[in-house]
Image: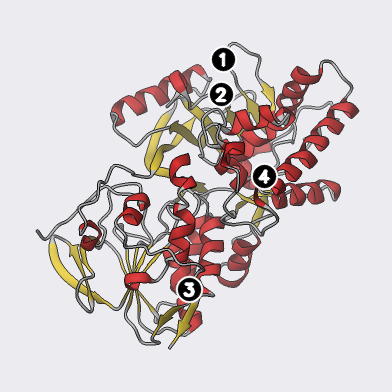
Amino acid sequence: MLVHRILVAAAGLLAACHFVPQATAQVINMRRHERIVIVGGGPAGVHYATLLVKKGFTNITILEQSTEVGGKSKTVVDPLGIPHELGTCYATSLYQPVFDLLKEYDPTNTLVPFVPFIKGHTYVNRDAMPIMDYKAYVAQLVHRLMGPVKERELVREIERAFVSYSSIHTSIFGVYAYGLPPQPSDWSRIDMSGLEFLRQNKLLALEGFFRFVFQQQGYGTLDTAPAFYMLWWIHPDLLRKRKEADAKRQPWAFMLSKGYQSLWKAMVAKYQRQIDVQLDTKVVQIARTLSPIYVTVRRSNVLDIVRADHLVMATDLSHMVTLPSDLLANDISLTKDLTSSSFVVSLFESDARKDESVSQWWPNRGVGELEGRLQLTRNSRLSLYNPLPAHGSQSDPAPTNWGVNATGRQTRVAYQFYNQRYPYSPTAVKTQLLADLESASFTNAVVQKQIVHNYFPRYNLTQLQQGLPWKIWDSQGSIRTTWIGSSVSFESVLDVVVYNNKLIDRVNIT
């Protein structure tokens, strides 16, 4: 059969014995002029292609199904020239590897501070509760624990919890640079949700901060997200960077002035002679049983063959993806799929609000009966052109002044989170969004574009205890294949860049 499509996850791949665990990660030997074919032109595929060029390889091809590179980095520029992020969005001070790429490839794509503690920057909405700004929300959660204490004691409790979290994190994983964590020796300490982990370890003073840095990135809610992934994402170095920035009264979270997709496009543009990017090219079959590897593709309904000496899979393994056909050789059950969620991102226009802000956030949505409800909005114009508005200090009694950018029709981005793949009606999703926008006083809303991302591929605890992410890492390069991207690391551009940087160090030109 020519077209062999299969819904499978890395767990099934490992079970098929095609990943052969090594005692230690082995060197990946390849010849300088090997035909290296990368399936997927998202951040992982584009970045790894540039690393291969720098390493000295000369024959690199990217096969991308869509009409442009970028993958889950999707930046839409409106007629006014304002970029709207409908995919990858934020960065923190921990993103130095990404900042290095910006400096090298896209230097005019600058960092714009994203400061939710500015008065009126991010309003927090909870059903049947008064709307408040982000700082008041964080304080309210701590007051719920401590009672009506003074602000000085509240701050002291939060800082104590930060120190305690870092200490507990180190006791579980040890000290390591950000990236795939070491395997913990005692999984029982993290066999729970992220919120339950905070509760059991007396860290609930951090709930407001942790919900913000985890949930606004599209990783679900702390109520249900595995503690392992919360601990992965919120590394002690992130807290250290935040503390250093706060001490200097500097921002530690950012957006990009031209959007993330600009970076990936700039990277392939620099190496357009060394990297053959084939767009609108759908992979329909991969056969590794022969030499070379045969990759069957479809372009404009015409089949073609791309030959490869080494295959790089940079696709989402948790969704329908064409994988090497020999993975089925042992008739292995394919039920142990990666779990993933759906992040529906919509670009919409509405009237200006009286309480205009950068963000409106519903932290308790996205779970249970509130799954799929409007969870977050972001005003792109205010976030990029008014990052530090007049009267934005919490101590300033005057209202925050967003200026002329807060007048007239406003274009915003809205998010809905489903803790499942996308089996539901697009019409129902849009209807729910419009109803929620109306009830939240976004009047005369018109949805201009909607994108569904299969998001946050992840393992369950049993798969993690089996060591699947680490076995994949150890087995990279076997059967002339390398696996990269969020499915084998974590759903962030920081992670795929860090993973690639470590992986290329194992590659040796023979």
Q: Name the residue rendered at 53%, 20% in the picture.
A: 441
Q: Please tell me how crowded label 4 is: few (under 14), some (14-19), or many (20+) other residues with Cα within 10 Å.
A: many
Find numbered disc 4 in the image and state the secondary structure of the residue it sits on.
loop
Are dots 1 and 2 in contact, CB under 8 Å? yes
Q: Please tell me how crowded label 3 is: few (under 14), some (14-19), or many (20+) other residues with Cα within 10 Å.
A: some
Q: Please tell me how crowded label 2 is: few (under 14), some (14-19), or many (20+) other residues with Cα within 10 Å.
A: some
Residue 127: image tag = 1
Q: Which residue is mark 2?
A: 364
User: The residue under label 1 is which amino acid type?
Assistant: Asp
User: The residue under label 4 is which amino acid type?
Assistant: Phe
Q: In the image, which is nearer the foreground, mark 2 or mark 4? A: 2
- State the image quarter where residue 143 is shown: top right
Find numbered disc 3 in the image and state the secondary structure of the residue it sits on.
loop
Q: In the image, which is nearer the foreground, mark 1 or mark 2? A: 2
Q: Residue most toward the top?
A: 128
Q: Is residue 437 visible?
A: yes
